[in-house]
Amino acid sequence: MKKIFIINGSQNFAHSGGKFNQTVTDWTIEYLTNSKQFEIKTTDIKQDFNLDEEVEKFVWADVVVYHTPVWWFQLPNLFKKYIDDVFTAGHNKGIYKSDGRTRTNPDINYGTGGQLHGRKYMLTTSWNAPATAFILPGEFFEETSVDDGAMFGFHKMNKFTGMEKLNSFHFHDVEKGATAENIVIFKENYTKHLEKTFKTL
C-alpha cells in the first residue's frame, strides 16, 4: 500500500475560517480511503504537533499532499512556520543533509542535498482570484501560472528535499464563487484530478 501524508495548511484569520481547505482535505481522505489502496497520515497545522513526529511523517510517506489557501500571494503564516520548523528539525534526520555543495567546488550542485528522494508531493491551493487572472492578457498575473509564479518558491523548496512534483490542482474564485453548485463542480473536478494522479503512482 502506498503511504500518503496529507497536510491541511489552512488557519483561522480575519474573515477566513479555514473551512474550504478542511473540505478539500476531507475530499482527499475520502477518495484515498474509498480506494482501499493507501495508508494515510494527516496533520492539521492549527493543532498542536511534535516536530520530530512531523519529520517522521515526511520520511514515512511515499506522497505528501499539501492543502493551502494563498494569502497575499504566499503561504499563510502558520503554514510557512510549520514548514520552516519541521524542515529545519529534519536536518540529518531524513529531510535534508546539506545544500548539496562541497567546499572544494561551492559554485555547483546547490539544492542537491535532500534526503527525500523517491517521494513525491502534490499541491492544492485555493484563491479568491479567478482562473482568468492568470491566463488572460492584461490581467493581474501577466499570463503566469500559479506554479510558475506565486508557488515557484514552494516547488523549489520541495525539490531541495529531493521530492518530485506531481501535477498541482488550484481552486479559483473561492470567495465570490463558492456557491453550493460550484462546490459540487469543485469536488467533481478535483476527484478526477485525484483519479488521474494516483492511478499512475
Image (cartoon, grey):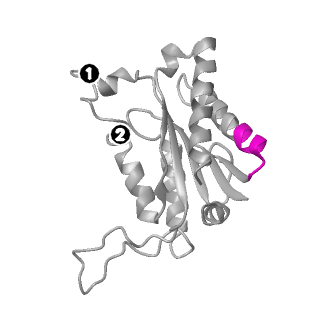
Residue identifier under label 1: 139
> How dense is the environment of label 1, judged by Cα within 10 Å: few (below 14), some, or many (20 and up)?
few
> How dense is the environment of label 2, judged by Cα within 10 Å: few (below 14), some, or many (20 and up)?
some
On the picture, is 136 further left or further right than 6? left
On the picture, is 74 further left or further right than 178? left
Q: Is residue 158 above or below residue 18?
A: below
Q: Residue at x 24, y 29 (%)?
A: 142
| Mark 2, secondary structure of its residue | loop
Q: Is residue 56 above or below residue 126?
A: below
Q: Is residue 108 above or below residue 87?
A: below
On the picture, is 156 further left or further right than 93? left
Placement of the N terminus among the 4 image quadrants: bottom right
Q: Residue at x 56, y 36 (%)?
A: 193
Placement of the C terminus among the 4 image quadrants: bottom right
**What secondary structure is the magenta-colored segment mainly?**
helix
Q: Residue at x 65, y 53 (%)?
A: 5
What span is colored magenta in the figure? Answer: 29-37
Q: Residue 114 appears in which quarter of the rendering? A: bottom left
Q: Residue at x 38, y 55 (%)?
A: 156
Amino acid type for the residue under numbered disc 1: Glu
On the picture, is 140 further left or further right than 129? left
